[in-house]
């Protein structure tokens, strides 16, 4: 028996459910979950290369963890969310990418320059996440900007604060 063709609206909804939502989940997690360890390491060590490796470890670890969690969450048959492998790869890659974007500035030897560049990258990441939520998830723009900035800001400030605790 031949299955009926999808309408353009149904295809768009399926694309959002199977591709955009796992990528957005990963970007949000990677961008936010790596902030605290990265900025705490920078504050505690005052060494960019050590902060870079903490950020690299946090990004890759989070990417693997989120990819597995998404792939193992369901088989996609009941929910229509797509294949576990596809969702897991998309989520894992997006998580690692979200964490690495603000980690890369720590390849710069100058701590203050690396921190300022990383701060700017974090702001761009959070606004990009808010825009993606607005565009694909049909969230209200100002509401989603507020939610993403407040959530990311709390974790960011936590990392900065923890990075000052070990300083004597």
Image: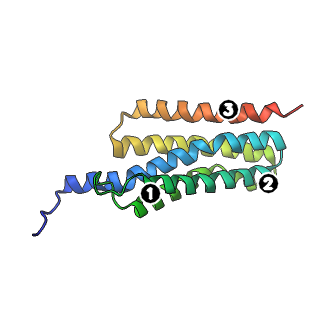
Residue 120: tell me if it is visible: yes
Q: Residue furthest right?
A: 168
The mark nearer the N terminus, 2 or 3, is 2
The mark nearer the N terminus, 1 or 2, is 2
- Where is residue 168? Give x, y as percent: 90, 31
Q: Between residues 68 and 140, which one lies in front from this camera angle?
A: 68
Residue where numbered disc 1 is placed: 71
143 on left or right of 82: right
Q: Nearer the viewer, mark 1 or mark 2?
A: 1
123 is higher (above) or lower (below) than 59: above
The mark nearer the N terminus, 3 or 1, is 1
Residue where numbered disc 3 is placed: 158
User: How many residues crowd mark 3 within 10 Å: few (<14), some (14–19), many (20+)?
Assistant: some
**Circle 2: element type:** helix
Q: Between residues 67 and 130, which one lies in front from this camera angle?
A: 67
Q: Residue furthest left?
A: 1
61 on left or right of 21: right
User: How many residues crowd mark 2 within 10 Å: few (<14), some (14–19), many (20+)?
Assistant: some
The Cα atoms of the two marked residues, 3 and 1, are separated by: 30 Å
Q: Are marks 1 and 2 in contact (CB under 8 Å)?
A: no
Residue 97: tell me if it is visible: no
Residue where numbered disc 2 is placed: 49
């Amino acid at each position: 028996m031949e299955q009926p063709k999808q309408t353009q609206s149904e295809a768009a909804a399926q694309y959002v459910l199977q591709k955009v939502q796992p990528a957005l989940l990963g970007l949000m997690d990677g961008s936010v979950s790596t902030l605290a360890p990265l900025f705490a390491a920078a504050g505690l060590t005052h060494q960019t290369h050590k902060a870079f490796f903490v950020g690299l470890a946090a990004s890759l670890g989070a990417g693997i963890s989120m990819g597995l969690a998404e792939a193992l969450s369901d088989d996609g048959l009941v929910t229509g969310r797509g294949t576990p492998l596809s969702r897991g790869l998309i989520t894992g890659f997006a998580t690692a990418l979200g964490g690495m974007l603000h980690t890369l500035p720590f390849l710069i030897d100058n701590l203050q320059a690396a921190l300022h560049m990383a701060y700017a990258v974090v702001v761009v990441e959070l606004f990009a996440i808010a825009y993606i939520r607005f565009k694909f998830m049909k969230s209200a723009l100002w509401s989603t900007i507020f939610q993403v900035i407040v959530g990311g800001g709390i974790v960011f400030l936590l990392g900065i604060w923890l990075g000052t605790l070990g300083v004597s």
